Image (cartoon, rainbow, N blue to C red):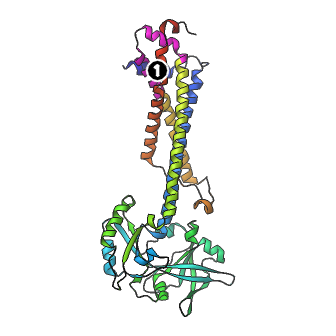
Amino acid sequence: MHLPLYLARHIYKNDGDKHKVSRPAVHIATAGVAIGLAVMIVTVAVVLGFKHTIRDKVIGFGSHIQVENFMTLQQSDAYPVCIGDSMMRMLKGIDGIKHVERFANTQGILKTDADFLGIIFKGVGQEYDMTFLRDNLTNGDIPHFSDSTSSNKILISRMTANRLQLRTGDHLYAYFIGEDNVRARKFSVAGIYESNMSQFDKAFCYTDIYTTRKLNEWSNDMCNGAELIVGDFGRIEQTAQNVIEKVNRTQDRLGQTFMSQTIYEAYPNIFSWLELLDMNVWIILALMACVAGVTMISGLLIIILERTQMIGTLKALGADNTTIRHTFLWFAVFVIGKGLIIGNVIGIGLVILQQATGIVTLDPQTYYVSKAPTELNIPLTLMLNIATLLVCITVLIAPSYVVSHIKPAKSIRFE
């Protein structure tokens, strides 16, 4: 049997003297590792959950890649482009594209007896992916939006509903101001959604693309652009490059130039803010690794000092410093291993508890979510375990050299 491993196992399992200082020192070191790992697991889970939740909300309003008029991307005004069936087939055939949907926007004013609100009507058709809106629907139903007929129904946000004191089934008028006239349309509220992304919730409502085209006096193939959903978000940059090669700088039947942009380019401020969260994660991971390392160093030194007689005896029997150092490093592995097990149980347990109950709530006006989102990533959790083990063992190498200063003649008489 491997001698250092055998001795380390014997020392770790030895409960002979309950009053020894080493027992509580070992417990403190184990707790330090467990708490450090648990905090790291929860931190990574919360940050990943928060970033992906906010990212998915932004994507829900703008998809992964947008193809629009070149002038729209250069100026604040919206310009139409013609996207017919042939263009749709070409977009769907681009490598990496999973789904394509057209949209047409127009600006109007929602008016009730008590108040009014300027808003953007986003017109969508039956091809539009309603998954995001369905997941965030709080009242009513999502109407069947069409590109050939008008349902005279709209889908509004909770923020808009509260502002205008509207409920599902209520009727209201919308006014659209043209160059030389004002047109009115009567709508009914089919459903109310709540994404907690205030900059989008207060700006958009949804209706038929047929309605917005008619209000804009556009033909059936004209729209503001197309939203492209990729099959693998991890390859969005490569897919965006494929779109650029096939779409950008081409022209529609009216001579308008197509251009594309990713969701990162459309909303750079939001994604830059999310990237800043990574720095906070690294700081927390470094602090927790230091906590675990310091507690393990103090614990190991106490064990070595308390085992001075044993070290002297081993040296008198012919054991070299390397064998004894390896013995205590193996002992540290047992302590760290127990701490990792406890830390995983606590950390993963807290993450699962939050996912199941949402016990930790947040202010949606500040954080865009009503409860702390968590995402358990198994590969990252394994990497945290391995990194914690390696960091703790590494910082213990230098303290383990204390055994080389212990002399057999003096240590055997040491009390």
Magenta stretch: helix, strand or loop mostly: helix
Image location (x, y in percent) of residue 120: 54, 78
Question: Image quadrant for the N terminus?
Answer: top left
Q: Residue furthest front?
A: 74
- Towards the viewer: 361 or 191: 361
Tell me where residue 248 appears, x and y as whole percent: 34, 73
**Pointer 1: what residue?**
401
Q: Is residue 69 visible?
A: no
Q: Is residue 363 above or below residue 327?
A: below
Question: Would residue 207 be found to the left or right of residue 164 on screen?
Answer: left
Residue 219 or residue 338, whichever sits in front? 219
- Image: 4 above or below 217: above
Name the one closer to the observer, 14 or 59.
59
Disc 1 crowd, CA 10 A, few/some/many (<14, 14-19, 20+): some
Image quadrant assignment for residue 72: bottom left
- Give the residue displayed 40% in from the left and 84% down from the top: 222
Location of residue 288 with respect to 295 vertically, above or below? below
Residue 105 point in image, percent of width and height:
49, 80
Range covered by the magenta-colored residues: 305-333
Tell me if residue 241 can be seen.
yes
Q: Amino acid at mark 1?
A: Tyr
Residue at image location 53% in from the left, 56% down from the top: 50
- Residue 120 lies in magenta, yes or no? no
Residue pictured at 57% horizontal, 28% vertical:
27
Residue at image x 56%, y 46%? 350
Magenta-colored stretch includes residue 324? yes
Q: Quadrant of the C terminus?
A: top right
Q: Position of residue 255 (x, y in %)?
A: 35, 84
Observer-nearest of 12 and 56: 56
Q: Secondary structure at mark 1?
A: helix
On screen, residue 248 versus residue 273, left or right, reads left
